[in-house]
C-alpha cells in the first residue's frame, strides 16, 4: 500500500502547492478554471506517438483548467526539464504526480517492447493494469482530500484500460478511446507469418473483450456525455457494443505549421517520406512493392524513419525487389523534432498501416505541407480529405499496392496537382491544431459539467463554432 502513502509531484510553479481555481478566458471560456484530475500514463514533452497524445491533450486542458496529472515516473526528468524552461502561460496551471515505480510496472524498455509486440503481450497488459491500480489509489486519496470538478482518463487510449477514475465521485471523462477495431482478415497476407499469428490472436481477443469485459462497459456508461472516441469507426463500435454515443475528437494534434509548402523543381527527384515503428502492421513493404513497379526513368527518393524488429527484413526486401538501395535512406529512430524537420524536405508522405488510429505522424506531415497517400481505413479518412491527399482502396493488399503506384505516377507527373494537395494538407492540419483541441475539450467539459449556454460567451462553448460530434469533412 506504499503507493497510497507516498508519491512525488512536479508543478509548473516550483515551490507551490496544488493549484487553486482562477478564471480563464482562453478561447472564450469565461468561467472559473475547472479543477481536473487526469490519468495519463503516456505523457512526454518531446516524444511522438501516444506520449505526444498525452502531452498535447494536457497542454490543451491546462489552457483553461487547473490540471493535476498522474503520469509514469520515467517521464519525470523530461517533464521537469521542460517546466524549468517553459514560458508558456499554461505551464503554470499543471501539476504532475508520479506514482512510485515498481519492478512489476510496465515501462517501454527494450525487453517490455519485445513482449508488447509478441504473443506474450498479456504480460504487458497485466503490468500496465498494475500501474493503473497504483494511480487509482493515489487518485482516490486526492479526491478525498480536495475538490475536483471532473476526472479524465487519457492515456493509454486502448479501450481495455479505463483505469479507476470512473469509480470516483467527480464527473468522469474517458478518451480519446481507441483499439476497438480489428485488423481486417483480408489484409493478413501483408503481415507475414508472425504478424498473422499475432493479429489473428488480437482480433479474437478484441471480439471477446468488446463484449465480455465489464469495466470498459461500466466506464463508458459512467462517462455519459464525457465519452470521447478517437475516430468515427471507434464511435460506431462504442455505440454497437455499449450502446453509448460519443463525441469524436482525434487523438492527435497538429504541431505548428510551416508558412509555405515545399516546391519540387523540374529536375528534382520525387522525395517520399514514411515514418513508423518497424513492425508488421505498419506494412512498409506495400510501399516498397509499389515503388518496384514504377518506370525506371521516374526518379524518386525515400526517407524511412523509425526502427523495430522488421528493419533488417525490410532492408533485405529492398534488394529482393530490385530497388536501388541508395534511393532509400534509413534514418532509424530520431527525436520528434528531427523527424519533423526531415519531413520539410519531402514532397509526399505515405502511410501503409494495416491497423492504427489516426497516427501522430499523419498530422506531423500535413503540418509541414505534405500531401498524404494512405489507406481508406482506420482514422485516416476522417482527416485526409480530397483536398489534402488521396485515400486509396485497401480491400486487399494487391489492390492498395496498385492504387498507390498509380497515385505516385500521377503526382510525379503533375506538380501543380501535388502543390494543390500540399496547400490543402497545410490548411487541413490547422483544423487539428492546439486551439481546435482546446475548443473540443471545452465542448466536452461543458456537457459533462452541465454548464448552461447562458453562462458561455457568444462564440459558444459549444456555441456556433463548437466542435461537432462527427469529424469535419
Image: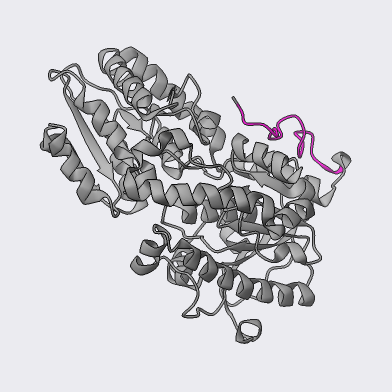
Q: Nearer the viewer, residue 263 or 32?
A: 263
Image location of residue 381, percent across then percent down? 52, 29
Image location of residue 257, percent across then percent down? 44, 36
Is residue 32 positioned above or below 145 on the image? above
Residue at 52% across, 31% down: 383
Q: How many marks?
A: 0
Residue at 37% across, 25% down: 400
Q: Quadrant of residue 271?
A: top left
Please state the extent of the stretch shown in magenta in the rendering.
455-472
**Does residue 30 appear in this view?**
no
Most prominent secondary structure in the magenta stretch? loop
Q: Quadrant of the N terminus?
A: bottom right
Image location of residue 372, percent across then percent down? 40, 28
Residue at 68% across, 56% down: 216
Magenta span contains residue 281 = no
Left or right: residue 472 versus residue 165 is left
Q: Quadrant of residue 133?
A: bottom right
Q: Nearer the viewer, residue 375 or 332?
A: 375
**Does residue 354 appear in this view?**
yes
Q: Quadrant of the C terminus?
A: top right
Left or right: residue 392 versus residue 127 is left
Image location of residue 66, percent across then percent down? 68, 61
Is residue 28 positioned above or below 41 on the image? above
Left or right: residue 448 versus residue 270 is right
Magenta span contains residue 467 = yes
Q: Nearer the viewer, residue 296 or 77?
A: 296
Amino acid at each position: 500500500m506504499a503507493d497510497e502513502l507516498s508519491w512525488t509531484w512536479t508543478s509548473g510553479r516550483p515551490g507551490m502547492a496544488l493549484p487553486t481555481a482562477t478564471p480563464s478566458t482562453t478561447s472564450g471560456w469565461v468561467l472559473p478554471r475547472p479543477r481536473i484530475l487526469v490519468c495519463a500514463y503516456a505523457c512526454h514533452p518531446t516524444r511522438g506517438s501516444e506520449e505526444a497524445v498525452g502531452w498535447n491533450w494536457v497542454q490543451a486542458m491546462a489552457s483553461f483548467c487547473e490540471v493535476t496529472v498522474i503520469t509514469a515516473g520515467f517521464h519525470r526528468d523530461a517533464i521537469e526539464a521542460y517546466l524549468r524552461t517553459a514560458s508558456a502561460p499554461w505551464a503554470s496551471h499543471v501539476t504532475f504526480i508520479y506514482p512510485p515505480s515498481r519492478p512489476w510496472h510496465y515501462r517501454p524498455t527494450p525487453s517490455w517492447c519485445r513482449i508488447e509486440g509478441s504473443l506474450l503481450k498479456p504480460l504487458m497488459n497485466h503490468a500496465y493494469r498494475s500501474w493503473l491500480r497504483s494511480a487509482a489509489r493515489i487518485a482516490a486519496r486526492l479526491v478525498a482530500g480536495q475538490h475536483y470538478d471532473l476526472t479524465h482518463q487519457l492515456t493509454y487510449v486502448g479501450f481495455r484500460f479505463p483505469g479507476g477514475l470512473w469509480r470516483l465521485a467527480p464527473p468522469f471523462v474517458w478518451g480519446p478511446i481507441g483499439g476497438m477495431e480489428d485488423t481486417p482478415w483480408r489484409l493478413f497476407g501483408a503481415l507475414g507469418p508472425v504478424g498473422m499469428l499475432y493479429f489473428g490472436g488480437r482480433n479474437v481477443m478484441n471480439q471477446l473483450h468488446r463484449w465480455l469485459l465489464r469495466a470498459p462497459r461500466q466506464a463508458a456508461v459512467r462517462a455519459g456525455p464525457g465519452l470521447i472516441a478517437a475516430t468515427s469507426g471507434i464511435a460506431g463500435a462504442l455505440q454497437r457494443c455499449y450502446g453509448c454515443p460519443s463525441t469524436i475528437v482525434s487523438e492527435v494534434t497538429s504541431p505548428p505549421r510551416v508558412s509555405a509548402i515545399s516546391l519540387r523543381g523540374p529536375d528534382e527527384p520525387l522525395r517520399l517520406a514514411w515514418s513508423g515503428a518497424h513492425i508488421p502492421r505498419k506494412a512498409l513493404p506495400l510501399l516498397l512493392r509499389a515503388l518496384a513497379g514504377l518506370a525506371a526513368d521516374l526518379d524518386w527518393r525515400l526517407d524511412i524513419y523509425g526502427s523495430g524488429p522488421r528493419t533488417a527484413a525490410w532492408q533485405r526486401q529492398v534488394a529482393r525487389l530490385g530497388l536501388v538501395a541508395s534511393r532509400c535512406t534509413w534514418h532509424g529512430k530520431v527525436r520528434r523534432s528531427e523527424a519533423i524537420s526531415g519531413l520539410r524536405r519531402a514532397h509526399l508522405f505515405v502511410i501503409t498501416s494495416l491497423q492504427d488510429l489516426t497516427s501522430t505522424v499523419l498530422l506531423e506531415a500535413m503540418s509541414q505541407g505534405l500531401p498524404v497517400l494512405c489507406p481508406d481505413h482506420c482514422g485516416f479518412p476522417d482527416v485526409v480529405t480530397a483536398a489534402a491527399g488521396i485515400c486509396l482502396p485497401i480491400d486487399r493488399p494487391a489492390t492498395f499496392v496498385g492504387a498507390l503506384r498509380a497515385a505516385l505516377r500521377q503526382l510525379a507527373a503533375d506538380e501543380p496537382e501535388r502543390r494543390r494537395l500540399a496547400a490543402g494538407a497545410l490548411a487541413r492540419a490547422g483544423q487539428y491544431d492546439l486551439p481546435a483541441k482546446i475548443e473540443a475539450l471545452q465542448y466536452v467539459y461543458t456537457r459533462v459539467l452541465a454548464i448552461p449556454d447562458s453562462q458561455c460567451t457568444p462564440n459558444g462553448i459549444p456555441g456556433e463554432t463548437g466542435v461537432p460530434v462527427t469529424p469535419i469533412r
